[in-house]
Image (cartoon, rainbow, N blue to C red):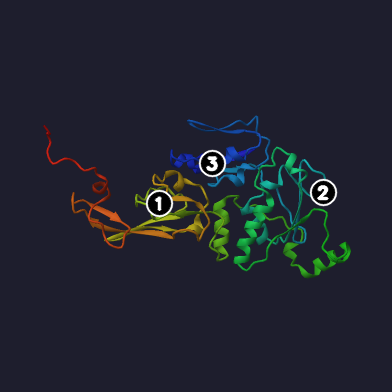
Amino acid sequence: MLNIDEERCVHRLTTAAKCRACVDSCPTRAWSMHADGLDLDPGRCDGCGLCVPACPSGALALAEPPELPLDQGSLKLVCERASGTGVRLPCVHALSEARLLDLQRNGLRRLMAHTGDCGACSRGAATPLSARVDAVNGELLRAGATTISVQAADAAAPGVSPRRGFLAGLLNRPMAMLGRTPAPSPDTRRAAVQGLAARGVRSTLWAVELDTRRCDGCALCAQLCPERAIVWLEGEREAGLSLHMERCVGCGICVDTCARQALKPGRAGCGAPGAVFRQARCGSCGGLFRHLEAHAPRHCPACRARAKRPNRLVVN
């Protein structure tokens, strides 16, 4: 069963939101989108949990998150539709970036999974677990932390007998890593970026790019961003957008509300880091306007776009 926090859903923040993460990730079509909002059919939900890591705003959570006990720094997962031993999950691909980072912090070093034939499974279109692990490992490397290795569920450590490997693990690993079952932390993207920030890493898991040539400084993106990943700074004669992509969770509100299409999904560190607007007075209408140019234009955008009109009101 799912716990749903409606107040966190991006569709509650703005009617311009186009997020379909839960709909697109659901293999049973339990989620659907209508003109008046999202709808969940509990009768169709099979509890796979794939919509939880897909939701960018953390509006969804499993009512009973699975316990993931670590054994000597290892975690073995088994899909409910596959054979094998380990922690049985409805779908191993539902393990989020937040839980992976939390498990690594608690000692996870090796991840093993029996997935069965994902190509023939109705859940096979989900973001693969391997892709999430790769993304998390990239962040861990930037933090100088130990990464998570992915192995086949029945693979032993290379060149080490099972008995010798077991004893070596007992001698070389701290007691905190032996048979530990970490308490689940919040399973949200916000928790993931906060966990990276605690390690001193500016997250690059999700981001948007700004095209300053299109931006008109309306600042609507900054007003609506729930994570303050885009901030509007106001000075006496200057103002601008400041992008803090280490806070971004990829909700897409800024992209959906930008009338000039100046924002698009991207990677942190790509595109312009922000935009600085200067204030000027129009030489035609006398109104104040903002501009990005090094030298102020003579006329505001409205006057520049105005069509030429005849000098006389009546023409014979």
Which residue has dot 1 on it?
A: 222
Please name the amino acid that badge 3 sits on: Asp
Q: Is residue 101 visible?
A: no
Q: Mark 2 or mark 3, which has the lower sequence index?
A: 3
Q: Is residue 28 left or right of residue 57?
A: right
Other residues around mark 1 within 10 Å, as few (<14) / some (14–19) / many (≥20): many
Which residue has dot 3 on it?
A: 5
Q: Position of residue 316 (x, y in %)?
A: 11, 32
Per the image, label 3 sits on a secondary structure element best described as: loop
3 or 1: mark nearer the eye: 1
Q: Position of residue 160 (x, y in %)?
A: 86, 66
Question: At 43% from the left edge and 41% from the top edge, which residue is drawn?
Answer: 14
Quadrant including the N terminus: top right
Which residue has dot 2 on it?
A: 85
2 or 3: mark nearer the eye: 2
User: What is the C-alpha distance between the residues marked 3 and 1?
Assistant: 23 Å
Q: Mark 1 or mark 2, which has the lower sequence index?
A: 2
Question: At 57% from the left edge and 61% from the top edge, which residue is drawn?
Answer: 196
Q: Is residue 280 left or right of residue 225?
A: left
Q: Are marks 1 and 2 in contact (CB under 8 Å)?
A: no
Q: Nearer the viewer, residue 163 or 316?
A: 316
Q: Nearer the viewer, residue 54 or 276?
A: 276
Please name the amino acid that badge 2 sits on: Thr
Q: Residue pushed farthest front? A: 316
